């Protein structure tokens, strides 16, 4: 199958906001956009039956309406509709395995009733084999609107140890496609040894900061060489990683966070940084599985 960007549609305004974001991204990357709507009760496509007798009428309407709007906004973009007779979670996980990215709508901490956004997005984020992007919609008097895109470029959260090739490939590729800077952020809580009766020991904090910066520069060096046109900066924050990442993303275009592909626990779960990013960052959040 040719590379695609897949967006989950459930008929909600939030999923339409996600579809608009996905269309922009697919156009930047010169990829096909796939509009996916899944429902277990879909039936085989009937032939020439009136709309009132077509059991798939509303499902097809959701996809066709979104497709018409997106084609009008992006005349040169290849957009395909995909109706799947399956549980939405299963359908999205299968789609994620063959997509460059999967995009879903999100409303942060607000209560959600929609099928995709309520029960589906978190399991998909936790289990997907490819990147999943959650696009948040802000509620206003005019209805859900895209969260402010920001001017801070792409922010990627990094630890000091581990393999981050998939994470950095996605972050650098996105920054390059958008023509925006990339900021690598590392948060690290201070050890008890850094505290003194009058506050914190500046020498200790300076040593921690310099060591962290040196590690990050080593991690980023090959990616700087691979993407020489991407402007890269490094931020070290001496606070909890979750708080540091959310704070750094306040004016970002996109926040990119990583998730381990394989965990020993019987059920996959999302770490503190990913949870904080999903619930509190106002910009779109990409969760990228890595080794």
Image (spheres, grey):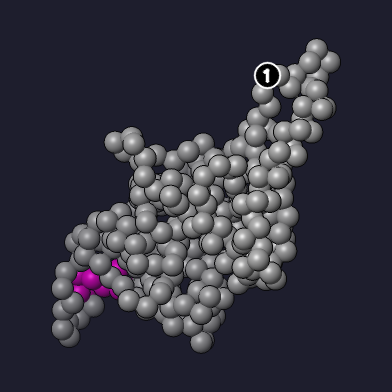
Residue at the image point whose x is 59% and y is 46% from the top: 158
What main secondary structure does the magenta stretch of the protein show? helix
Does residue 64 show up? no
Does residue 234 show up? yes
* 52 or 258, nearer to the observer: 258
Quadrant in which residue 43 is drawn = bottom left
Residue at the image point whose x is 56% and y is 57% from the top: 168
Residue at the image point whose x is 60% and y is 48% from the top: 157
Give the residue at mark 1.
Answer: 192
Q: Is residue 53 magenta?
A: yes
Q: Secondary structure at mark 1?
A: helix
- Give the crowd class for mark 1: few <14, some 14-19, many >=20 residues within 10 Å: few
Q: Is residue 205 magenta?
A: no
Q: Quadrant of the N terminus?
A: bottom left
171 lies above or below 72: above
The magenta stretch is 52-61
Outermost residue toward the top? Answer: 197
Residue at the image point whose x is 65% and y is 66% from the top: 225
36 lies above or below 234: below
- Taking the image as shown, residue 35 lies to the left or right of residue 214, namely left
The image position of residue 83, as x and y in percent, is 28, 70
């Amino acid at each position: 199958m040719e590379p695609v960007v897949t967006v989950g549609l459930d008929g909600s305004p939030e999923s339409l906001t996600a579809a608009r974001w996905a269309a922009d991204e697919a156009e930047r990357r010169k990829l096909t956009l796939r509009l996916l709507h899944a429902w277990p009760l879909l039936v085989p496509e009937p032939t020439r039956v009136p709309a009132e007798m077509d059991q798939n009428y509303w499902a097809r309407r959701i996809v066709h309406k979104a497709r018409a709007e997106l084609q009008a906004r992006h005349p040169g973009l290849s957009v395909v509709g995909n109706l799947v007779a399956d549980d939405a979670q299963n359908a999205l996980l299968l789609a994620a395995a063959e997509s460059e990215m999967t995009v879903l709508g999100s409303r942060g901490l607000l209560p959600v009733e929609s099928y995709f956004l309520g029960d589906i997005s978190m399991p998909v984020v936790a289990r997907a084999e490819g990147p999943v992007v959650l696009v948040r919609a802000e509620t206003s008097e005019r209805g859900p609107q895209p969260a402010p895109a920001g001017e801070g470029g792409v922010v990627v959260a990094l630890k000091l140890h581990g393999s981050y090739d998939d994470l950095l490939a996605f972050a650098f590729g996105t920054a390059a496609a958008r023509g925006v800077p990339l900021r690598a952020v590392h948060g690290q809580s201070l050890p008890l040894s850094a505290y003194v009766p009058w506050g914190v020991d500046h020498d200790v904090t300076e040593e921690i900061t310099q060591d962290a910066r040196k590690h990050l520069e080593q991690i980023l060096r090959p990616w700087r060489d691979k993407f020489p046109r991407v402007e890269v900066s490094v931020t070290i924050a001496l606070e909890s990683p979750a708080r540091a990442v959310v704070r750094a993303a306040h004016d970002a275009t996109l926040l990119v966070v990583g998730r381990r592909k394989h965990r020993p626990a019987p059920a996959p779960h999302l770490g503190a940084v990913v949870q904080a990013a999903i619930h509190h960052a106002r910009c779109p959040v990409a969760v990228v599985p890595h080794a």
